[in-house]
Image (cartoon, rainbow, N blue to C red):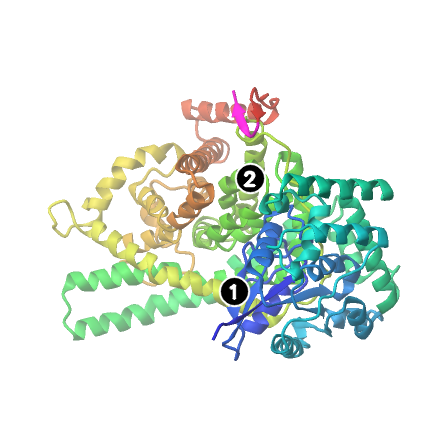
């Protein structure tokens, strides 16, 4: 039996993805920022094995100006689902009905769901669904996904719609003069276009939609007749064809809204308006944002998250797990080398990473709260105003925000950026933001060198943003990235209390992904690192300082000596971080696995490096690992999104080079000004680097000497 397919269609932030989760039970990110769903998502409706649902990207129109609209329109026209469920924000009825009028013209059976009705009714406004259904010619239901109201009713109506067969065609009727033109166009359409699709194709031909004109093979005589119909109609209306359609749609929508909607207190400021007047204020927005992010990291690193981390490291992996496993291995008379592998390699390495899980969970919960309540949408708006001055778009902030959880989906979120140059530049810079895998490094350095200072953890966030801004200024002035910044259109949803269920689910999913990585990648890495740190070239078990790992580390360590941490242990930890950033802490856990009762900060590791590492060097180490090339998984994502190994190599080289220069400058300046070291050649080079960067920031953009001929760049 063939499965029926239903597509969820609606504007961004209309509640589409929330409804998708409610219908399918699928675990998918639900946030209040544009670009959550880059591609359509498919799921099976619970308890209905014969019914599939597609979650299409949030779109404003079926005229494809963005990648999201292209994906949605291609699926609706070529995929032809059996039914549509159009989700509308009841609080913005007039704006959302524009897409509805276009969906009606597709000739696909449809149901309209008015979401967020509870918010509308709380404001004292009314929408008469019976009148709206009469005006549109399709079923209309009230819904509040966040309170699980109307979900079952929408499913019931959908079942009835599919059971009863095709819905009678219903679409808006416009000015009689326009209708005559559309009927004439429909009469000359090829027979390959079905009757249910003729209305939509007639309008698209009338609008001179180039994508549609390329898809349909029309004879020269038909094209000439089509152009004559359009030209005559344009002269009658004294407007171009596209404007005629837009105006007629809005005229129809205005009549529908006047018929079915009663607005109360429409001129009064809402609570969201009052809050926005503060958090998006020109002068207050950035201080508030800085304060919020400081609070998030303070709660995660130094207060709430620390209590759980302390227990995991001191009790769970400090006593219970090692002692229990050691007792079992002794009873079973396991070989000493295998005991060392399990205790000093696997448990020490994986445990050192998992010890930071409570802090990560607090971070995930805080970010989920900010996303769900609507604040992060405001930050995207504020950052667009800020980024645009430096050659980036507000759309670039969305991947950066996603990257605070994991760099891989952050890189993939760059697909929403239409401008190819801006997209590549965002891919190159988005991993500068500290992801969850870098949080253990932040916690390690903070606890070991700055235990009573609250600025270190938040500084990691703002250093990442500063690196992005500086990169945007410098790269945008080069020929590779010149061009106008991509426009950014977004809708600010009303503030609302986050759903506990949604916040907990997101925290659980992200934490589960972190644990899964610790159980696979970190496990394998810990085993390999232990073997390399326990054996020499002859295969003999030796002290760590004489091992293969130490030999390899010492050969590379001089490269990092100007950064202040040229020891082989720190070098090896950094190199293994390319596999997964969690390996940085995990490597120290293996190298110093003989230490018992390691605290949540891991500072017991650092006395062994006290001759090489100072607080300034420790902060330099932190900055390098925050900004350098990301993990293998993220590098793979960069390769897929760039679709070119040369661009991938350039991105990795740029990230690593910038990380080296930042760490070098910070250490050299700190070494002289704070540790009172003498001025030397390395300090001079650091000053020279700052001067060069300053020049690159203020210099005039390079004038491109290329010209474009029919899509081909000619030098």
Secondary element at image label 1: strand
Q: Is residue 468 left or right of residue 513?
A: right
Residue segment shown in magenta: 710-715
Q: Nearer the viewer, residue 452 or 82?
A: 82
Where is residue 584 shown, x and y percent of the image? 37, 50
Kindly identify the residue that appears in the image at 63 percent across and 74 percent down: 165
Where is residue 298 shown, x and y percent of the image? 56, 56
Please name the residue that numbered disc 2 is placed on: 468
- Residue 712 lies within the magenta run: yes
Q: Nearer the viewer, residue 318 or 652?
A: 652
Q: Which residue of the protein is positioned furthest toward the front in this rendering? A: 221
Please name the residue that numbered disc 1 is placed on: 42
Rounded to the nearest whole Å, what is the CA distance between mark 1 and mark 2? 34 Å
Does residue 213 show up?
Answer: yes
Where is residue 420 shown, x and y percent of the image? 55, 38
Above or below, 159 relative to 228: below
Kindly identify the residue that appears in the image at 21 percent across and 61 percent down: 340
Does residue 400 show up?
Answer: no
Secondary element at image label 2: helix
Q: Which mark is residue 424?
A: none
Q: Nearer the viewer, residue 22 or 209?
A: 209
Above or below, 261 relative to 291: below
Where is residue 20 shown, x and y percent of the image? 58, 68
Which-is-in-front pick, marks 1 and 2? 1
Kindly identify the residue that appears in the image at 37 percent across and 60 percent down: 518
Q: Is residue 676 left or right of residue 607?
A: right
Q: Nearer the viewer, residue 554 or 204?
A: 204
Above or below, 474 relative to 152: above
Q: Is residue 219 left or right of residue 467?
A: right
């Amino acid at each position: 039996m063939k499965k029926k397919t239903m597509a969820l269609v609606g504007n961004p932030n209309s509640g589409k993805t929330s409804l998708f989760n409610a219908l399918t039970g699928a675990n998918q990110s639900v946030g209040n920022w544009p670009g959550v769903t880059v591609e359509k998502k498919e799921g099976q409706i619970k308890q209905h094995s014969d019914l599939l649902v597609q979650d299409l990207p949030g779109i404003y129109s079926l005229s494809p100006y963005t990648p999201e609209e292209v994906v949605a329109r291609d699926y609706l026209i070529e995929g032809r689902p059996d039914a549509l469920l159009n989700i509308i924000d009841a609080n913005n009825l007039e704006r959302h009905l524009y897409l509805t009028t276009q969906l009606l013209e597709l000739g696909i059976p449809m149901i309209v769901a008015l979401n967020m009705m509870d918010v509308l009714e709380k404001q004292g406004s009314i929408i008469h669904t019976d009148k709206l259904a009469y005006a549109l010619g399709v079923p209309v239901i009230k819904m509040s996904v966040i309170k699980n109201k109307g979900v079952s009713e929408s499913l019931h109506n959908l079942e009835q719609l599919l059971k009863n067969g095709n819905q009678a065609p219903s679409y808006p009727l416009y000015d009689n003069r326009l209708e005559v033109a559309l009927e004439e166009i429909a009469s000359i359409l090829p027979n390959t276009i079905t009757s249910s699709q003729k209305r939509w194709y007639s309008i698209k031909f009338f609008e001179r939609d180039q994508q549609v004109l390329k898809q349909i093979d029309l004879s020269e005589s038909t094209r000439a007749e089509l152009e004559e119909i359009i030209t005559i109609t344009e002269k009658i209306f004294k407007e171009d064809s596209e404007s005629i359609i837009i105006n007629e749609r809005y005229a129809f929508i205005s009549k529908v809204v006047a018929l079915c909607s009663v607005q109360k207190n429409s001129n009064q400021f809402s609570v969201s308006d009052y809050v926005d007047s503060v958090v998006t204020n020109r002068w207050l927005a950035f201080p508030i944002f800085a304060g919020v992010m400081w609070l998030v990291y303070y709660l995660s690193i130094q207060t709430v998250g620390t209590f759980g981390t302390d227990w995991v490291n001191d009790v769970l992996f400090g006593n219970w797990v090692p002692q229990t496993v050691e007792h079992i291995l002794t009873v079973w008379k396991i070989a000493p080398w295998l005991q060392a592998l399990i205790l000093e390699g696997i448990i020490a390495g994986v445990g050192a990473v998992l010890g930071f899980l409570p802090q990560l969970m607090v971070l995930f919960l805080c970010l989920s709260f900010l996303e769900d309540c609507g604040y992060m949408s405001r930050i995207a708006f504020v950052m667009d105003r800020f980024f645009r001055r430096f050659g980036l778009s507000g759309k670039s902030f969305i991947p950066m925000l996603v990257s605070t959880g994991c760099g891989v989906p952050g890189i993939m979120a760059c697909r929403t950026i239409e401008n190819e140059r801006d997209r590549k530049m965002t891919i190159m810079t988005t991993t500068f933001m500290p992801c969850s895998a870098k949080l253990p490094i932040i916690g390690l350095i903070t606890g070991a060198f700055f235990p009573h200072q609250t600025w270190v953890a938040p500084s990691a966030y703002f250093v990442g943003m500063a690196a992005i801004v500086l990169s945007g200024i410098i790269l945008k002035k080069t020929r590779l990235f010149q061009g106008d910044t991509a426009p950014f259109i977004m809708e600010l949803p009303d503030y609302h209390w986050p759903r506990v269920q949604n916040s907990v689910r997101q925290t659980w999913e992200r934490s589960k992904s972190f644990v899964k990585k610790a159980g696979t990648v970190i496990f394998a890495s810990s085993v390999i690192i232990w073997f390399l740190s326990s054996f020499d070239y002859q295969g003999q078990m030796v002290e760590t300082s004489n091992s293969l790992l130490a030999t390899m580390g010492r050969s590379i360590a001089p490269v990092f000596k100007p950064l202040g941490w040229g020891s082989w242990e720190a070098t090896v930890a950094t190199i293994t971080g390319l596999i997964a950033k969690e390996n940085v802490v995990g490597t120290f856990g293996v190298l110093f696995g003989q230490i018992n009762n390691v605290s949540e900060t891991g500072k017991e590791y650092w006395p062994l490096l006290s001759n090489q590492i100072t607080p300034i060097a420790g902060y330099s180490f932190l900055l390098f690992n925050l900004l350098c090339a990301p993990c293998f998984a993220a590098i793979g994502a960069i390769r897929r999104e760039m679709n070119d190994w040369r661009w991938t190599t350039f991105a990795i080289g740029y990230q690593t080079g910038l990380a080296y220069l930042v760490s070098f400058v910070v250490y050299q300046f700190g070494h002289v000004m704070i540790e009172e070291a003498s001025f030397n050649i390395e300090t001079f080079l650091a000053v020279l680097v700052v001067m060069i960067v300053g020049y690159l920031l203020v210099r005039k953009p390079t004038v491109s000497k290329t010209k474009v001929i029919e899509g081909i760049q000619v030098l």
